[in-house]
Amino acid sequence: MSNKPGFAALQQAANWYAEVQDISSPQTYPAALQRWLDENQENQLAWQYVLNISQRFSPLRENGERQAAAFTALTQRTHNSGRRQVLKMAAWISVGTLLAWGSWRHTPLRNLVLAWHADYHTPHGEITSFTLADGSRIWLDTDSALNVDYSPTQRALQLLNGRMMIETAADQHRPLTVATVQGKMRALGTRFSVQALGDTTVLQVYQGAVEVSPAAVSDASIVQAGQAMTFRQDSFGPMSPLRNAQPAWPRGLLQADNLPLGEFIERLSAYRRGYLGCDPAVSALTVTGTFPLHDTDMALDMLTNALPVQLNRRFSWWLTVAPRDK
């Protein structure tokens, strides 16, 4: 099972939260909520997910104390096998609380922790740009972190998390490299983007060329302008053509060309605080257009004007795209 709960479990957890949020003591929560939590680990994860988000938005959840009390009270009666699940989940919850709800990604934990101390990092929902000492220009996507190590002999960048794009400045004496957990990329006078996705790295080259060297492979491969490659530590992925001549996200835009609505919502949610979900009943609808990332409310309004969908707001921080009422 994926670490992220499914749509149905999340919606049920939100419904339970709406029912019990005004109850002063978790000990008096309905027995039905306890039974629902005891059903499986997914329900427990969904409940903690809602509590984590509510902490960021609700003054009733001050400093997370009530969330911890609520979760402890509702899981303390679990039988032994369930308790083992809870212990496993506790480690996940600690990480989720530390990194905030928006960092539910498959990135190695070590890199996520290091991201907090990175030279450059962007919080959830923001895109930043800056110029390095050599004149190279960087765009750093939401929830991303980058370390920079310049010396007289090298220009080394390390993408710890998320996505970056770079326009490299010329320097005949110092090669510029970008490293991820999967390997290293050497710029050959170029403009390219790199995205760290857990056990894979996605490289897209828009100008020039990039040499790719996976960490556990002795060979290297050249990716030319107009091409993309997804590679792992021990293998090269296939080459594929870029879908767009230039990326839209550094300009604060999300471009969709017959993109399934479920995937569109997942991408947009990376730039929005709180929960944004898509009902499976409409997830296969296709989206075409250009949408602003800096104003997700505007993007969602554009969506409801173009498709037979509506926005169901459970709380100010819990929004679902669902079929339009007839």
Image (tube, rainbow, N blue to C red):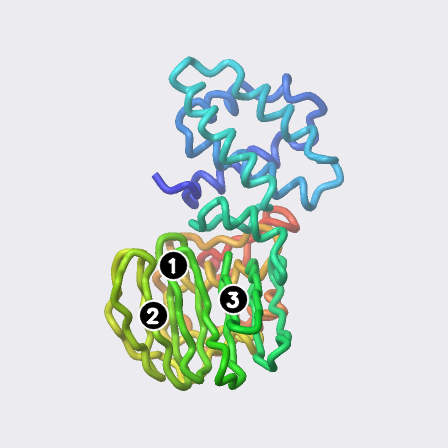
| Left or right of 29, for residue 265 | left
Q: Horizontally, is 321 left or right of 122 in the view?
A: left
Total marks in image: 3
| Percent position of residue 260, x then y | 37, 65
Tag 1 near tag 3, CB within 8 Å: no
| Rendered image quadrant of residue 204 | bottom left
Q: Which residue was labeled with disc 1?
A: 283
Residue assigned mark 2: 212
Task: Classify mark 3: residues with Cα within 10 Å, few (<14), some (14-19) or many (20+).
Answer: some
Q: Residue at x 49, y 53 (%)?
A: 277
Tag 3 or tag 2, which sits nearer the N-term? 3
Q: Is residue 74 left or right of residue 65?
A: left
Q: Secondary structure at mark 1?
A: loop
- Taking the spot 47% from the left edge, 30% from the top edge, the residue there is 89
Residue type at tag 1: Ser
Q: Is residue 248 above or below residue 325?
A: below
